[in-house]
Amino acid sequence: MTKKRITDLPIHDRPREKLVGKGAAALSDRELLAVLLGKGTARMDVLTLAEKLARVLDEKGLGVTIDDLTAFEGIGNAKAALLVAALEYARRRIKPAGISIRSPADIVPHLRHYADRKQEHVICATVNGANEILNIRVIAIGLVDRAPVHPREVFADAMTDRASAIILAHNHPAGSTAPSPHDREITRQVKASGDLLGIALLDHVIFTRNSYFSFLEAGLL
């Protein structure tokens, strides 16, 4: 099926007009990026370009660089600088408030935008000694009901961030937050690896748009 170009959409469904009419919270990640980009290229609609960029931003989180973005056709220094500046500005406004994780419910708002993804996205949030979020990254993308992940992928960025702890999370596209045997085994492996590395696994959260399951709250950690 051919994806709709932005000009094929009704005016009220176009990202900029949708933002004005309904507010930023009503837009998907792809639509928000499309607003920042403004336009695509001669060969790529802005929504398609935004979707490609979203994958890189998922993987890099706040660590994304100008070079990461300019690797894409249609993204020059000016657009890349705008995106990186927007991320840094948002980080500075949020960070002083100390995004501190005191309970599983505190991390969920920072994950909700992944809830509508059609595949499982495994996410790792790195945390410092004050339980403040350092970064949030997608470390694996899988099928509808399973995403392959190995402890080495989980802890690679955590070690770079000099994190004291991590929170593992993933969405369940099928809708249920009940942990599968695979989820339980991954949790056991990651916790054991973290104990060896001195990086604690604080929780593993399974989430959908409307609910979540916490291994910590369920007494499974």
Image: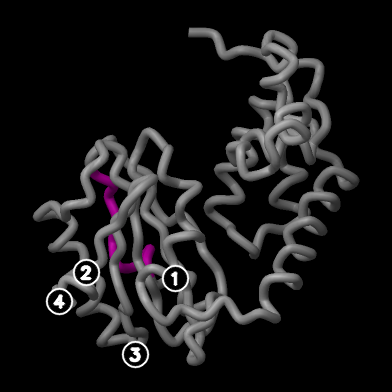
Q: Amino acid at mark 3?
A: Gly
Q: Nearer the viewer, mark 2 or mark 3?
A: 2
169 up-or-down from 42: above or below: below
The residue that label 1 is drawn on is: 106
Q: Nearer the viewer, mark 2 or mark 1?
A: 1
Asked if the residues shown at circle 2 and circle 4 are in contact, with their CB atoms under 8 angstroms apart, the answer is no
Q: Secondary structure at mark 4?
A: loop
Comes first in the chain, label 2 or label 1: 1
Res 55 → quadrant: top right
Q: Which residue does the image show at 73% across and 63% down from the upper left?
A: 90
180 up-or-down from 145: above or below: below
The residue that label 2 is drawn on is: 215
Q: CA distance from mark 4 to mark 3?
A: 21 Å
Q: Give the magenta range.
A: 146-154
Q: Secondary structure at mark 2?
A: loop
Q: Amino acid at mark 4?
A: Gly
- Give residue 173's position: percent from left, percent from top: 31, 38
Q: CA distance from mark 2 to mark 3?
A: 20 Å
Specify few, some or many for label 2: CA neighbours under 10 Å numbering under 14, 14-19, or 20 or more: some
Comes first in the chain, label 4 or label 3: 3
The residue that label 3 is drawn on is: 198
The residue that label 4 is drawn on is: 219
Q: Which residue does the image show at 69% across and 51% down from the upper left?
A: 68
Asked if the residues shown at circle 2 and circle 1 are in contact, with their CB atoms under 8 angstroms apart, the answer is no
Res 8 → quadrant: top right
- Closest to the observer, 56 or 106: 106
Say whether residue 214 is left or right of residue 8. left
Q: How many marks?
A: 4
Name of the residue lying farthest toward the left: 181
